[in-house]
Image (cartoon, rainbow, N blue to C red):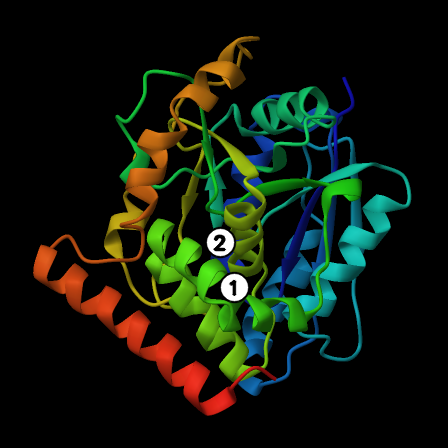
Amino acid sequence: MIVYPVVIPTLCRYEHFKNCVETLSRCTLAEQTELVIGLDFPKKQVHKDGYKKIREYLDTISGFAKITIFTTDVNLGASKNSRRLIDYVYETYDAVIITEDDNVFSPCFLEFMNKILNEYRDNTKVTSVSGYTAISYYGVTTNSLILTHDYSAWGHGVWKNKRVYREIGYYKTVCHSFKKSFRVFMEYPAVLGMLIEMLRRGERWGDTMYTVDNILDDTYQLRPALSMVRNMGQDGSGLHSGINPIFLSQEISIEDRFELDTNAFDKALKQVDKITKRTFYLGLSANRFKVFCQASNVVVKWVFNRVCFGRK
């Protein structure tokens, strides 16, 4: 079995980064794993203290087969910092495991990721794997794996030949197409709203784009039924995150081994409809009236986008 490198882009969140690395180091297969770290240069004065602490901590990291560190004298930004790490791994490997610096992991996380990346590299239905599973999916199935169109980047793995980079113009055509927009909306209203906001800002949000791709291409991200990742960045410290204590206390697996059931994929495929029903409510309120209001707001945004920007 190929054991794939793990990449972590970071900047200044010392405590988060330290916890991320230390939980990774306690994972099964850590001693066979190359850890690739990209430390960006601070752009703001407020980031310098955390940046210095991380620089000092880098020399103390142990527990991995190899530690590769990328630094820079200029601020690259999150996207370019991540890209250089992924490009480095793709020079040698056909897949990579990527995590933000605010995740902590179950002891079985690395074994799960590597077994899935090895087993499903040729399965055209699976475009990525993630160790994170939303609480909304808990209890839907007794199977060890689930398949979802939703793309989570909270501890995810991608194959080089499946990492499709579509131009931003493609996603504009999705919003301008009633058929495609309706399909996305009926499965995952919140992600259509995020896609419209992404285009309005002129940015590229990977998880949003890959979710839309999965919905329209009928492909999936494969995940464990019980999450192996807890996201600690929902404490207000993240680039795009607010404060949500539900994520901070989420139950995750405590197992140190993961055994892959050869029939798990077929079982997961049979459970897709149940998972899709839960996907509809991701990012929406638990209150039915608020769900209606939130979904209606997405429709208003879509109409406004069509009226103001036409079919360009």
Label 1: which secondary element: loop
Residue contact between numbered discs 1 and 2, judged by CB atoms under 8 Å: yes
Locate residue 202 relative to residue 89 in the image: left or right.
left
Residue at far right of view: 91
Residue at image x 71%, y 78%? 75
Of badges 1 and 2, nearer the viewer stands 2
Q: Residue at x 52, y 37 (%)?
A: 23
Q: Position of residue 84 (x, y in %)?
A: 80, 60
Q: Which residue has dot 1 on it?
A: 13
Seen from the viewer's position, the closer of residues 255 and 200 is 200
Task: Name the residue tied to disc 2.
Answer: 102
Classify 74 as above or below 236: below
Q: Quadrant of the N terminus?
A: top right
- Where's the C terminus, which quadrant? bottom right
Q: Position of residue 294 (x, y in %)?
A: 22, 67
Percent position (x, y) of residue 218?
54, 40
Q: Taking 36 as reference, is 43 above or below it?
A: below
- Rate crowding at label 1 as few (under 14), some (14 to 19) or many (20 or more) other CA atoms within 10 Å: some
Tell which of 194 and 216 is nearer to you. Answer: 216
